[in-house]
């Protein structure tokens, strides 16, 4: 696969798409891989991580950093991850606020985006054989089934944390499977995406101010260790899944796309806007909070909306807005990176 030539505007839009991926990955039930898929750079994304192999390692160890950068499509990955980093400190935090203030409207926006994704991806897919229809159905059922599972309890065992990293990265590589929601099901969403990241942020801020007291705090050091193991597992999972998906795209392109369409369709159940949060309780029925004092989310109970309430009509408007957003992404993606 030849690396495409990008203009300045292409690079700018790629950073924006990285921001969109980062925001999607942060929200439980939404997959950053969907953004890559509908925006037209999913296969290049997978291809780039396939290049993280023995040859890349050899180039790195020999100090041939420019060759390594070109070999792994470094410009593409660096721009994309720049967007994801920006997202974490900007858009993702804004969505955290909005999802607390108006959760139905936020979920409605994402529901509309995924609904639009299913429509436009299915519309452009022209290999609807009996086999591919069956694979799409299986993918849909797996997506729906995931949303109905009951979550486990939190577990900071490092082998399990490593496994969480491998599995949760599916939100980036497999459109329709949300890494954040999988972590909720595994019971480690708060530990890995809230507590450990907060501990890392605390470490950076206090180290710059000359305060290294965190070094003598066993609980804090354990959270940093957990984060490191989680990131290592995520890297292993990302490279492994990318190689697997690259192989399936090469040999079974139609079947792979059909299954992905199914995954995305099944994820509509996860992001259904009208749902109530089920928070975690201790053994005597008291509310359990994370280190920031926020209730720990355990799952959702879904219900049908009362359309006599004006607020629900605003949610319908947000669904339409999400659908239109995907239309614009789809239209741009068809002409992207020429």
Image: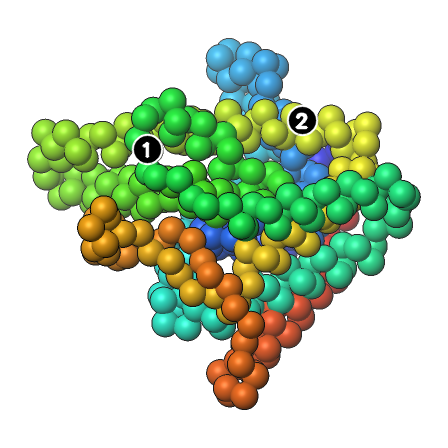
Front-most of 115 and 64? 115
Query: Are circles 1 and 2 on residues that touch, CB within 8 Å?
Result: no
Name the quarter where the N terminus is drawn: top right
| Residue at the image point whose x is 59% and y is 79% from the top | 317
Front-most of 276 and 229? 276
Q: Nearer the viewer, mark 1 or mark 2?
A: 1
Q: Position of residue 8 (x, y in %)?
A: 62, 52
Q: Position of residue 92 (x, y in %)?
A: 42, 57
Q: Secondary structure at mark 2?
A: helix
Distance from the alpha carbon under mark 1 to that under mark 2:
28 Å
Q: Position of residue 29 (x, y in %)?
A: 52, 53
Front-most of 297 and 332? 297
- How packed mark 2 is, by other alpha carbons closer than 10 Å (few <14, some 14-19, many 20 or more), is some
Disc 1 designates what residue?
155
Q: Which numbered marker is on residue 44?
A: none
Disc 2 designates what residue?
244
| Residue at the image point whose x is 48% and y is 65% from the top | 275
């Amino acid at each position: 696969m030849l690396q495409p030539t990008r203009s300045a505007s292409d690079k700018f839009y790629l950073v924006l798409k990285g921001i969109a991926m980062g925001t999607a990955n942060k929200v439980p039930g939404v997959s950053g891989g969907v953004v890559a898929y509908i925006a037209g750079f999913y296969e290049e994304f997978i291809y780039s991580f396939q290049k993280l192999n023995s040859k890349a390692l050899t180039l790195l160890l020999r100090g041939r950093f420019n060759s390594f950068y070109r070999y792994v499509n470094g410009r593409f990955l660096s721009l994309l991850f720049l967007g994801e980093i920006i997202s974490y400190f900007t858009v993702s935090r804004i969505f955290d606020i909005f999802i607390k203030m108006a959760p139905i409207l936020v979920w409605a926006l994402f529901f509309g985006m995924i609904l639009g994704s299913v429509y436009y991806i299915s519309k452009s897919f022209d290999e609807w054989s009996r086999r591919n229809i069956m694979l799409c159905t299986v993918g849909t059922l797996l997506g729906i089934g995931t949303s109905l599972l009951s979550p486990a309890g939190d577990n900071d065992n490092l082998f399990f944390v490593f496994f969480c990293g491998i599995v949760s990265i599916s939100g980036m590589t497999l459109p329709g499977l949300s890494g954040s929601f999988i972590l909720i099901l595994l019971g480690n969403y708060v530990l890995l995406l809230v507590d450990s990241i907060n501990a890392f942020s605390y470490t950076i801020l206090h180290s710059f101010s000359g305060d290294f007291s965190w070094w003598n705090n066993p609980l804090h050091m354990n959270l940093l260790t957990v984060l490191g193991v989680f990131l290592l597992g995520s890297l292993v999972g990302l490279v492994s899944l990318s190689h697997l998906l690259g192989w399936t795209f090469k040999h079974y392109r139609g079947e792979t796309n059909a299954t992905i369409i199914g995954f995305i369709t099944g994820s509509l159940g996860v992001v259904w806007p009208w749902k109530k949060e089920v928070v975690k309780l201790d053994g005597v029925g008291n509310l359990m909070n994370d280190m920031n004092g926020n209730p720990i989310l355990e799952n959702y109970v879904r219900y049908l909306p009362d359309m006599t309430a004006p607020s629900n009509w605003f949610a319908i408007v947000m669904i339409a807005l999400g659908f239109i957003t995907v239309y614009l992404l789809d239209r741009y993606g068809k002409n992207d990176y020429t």
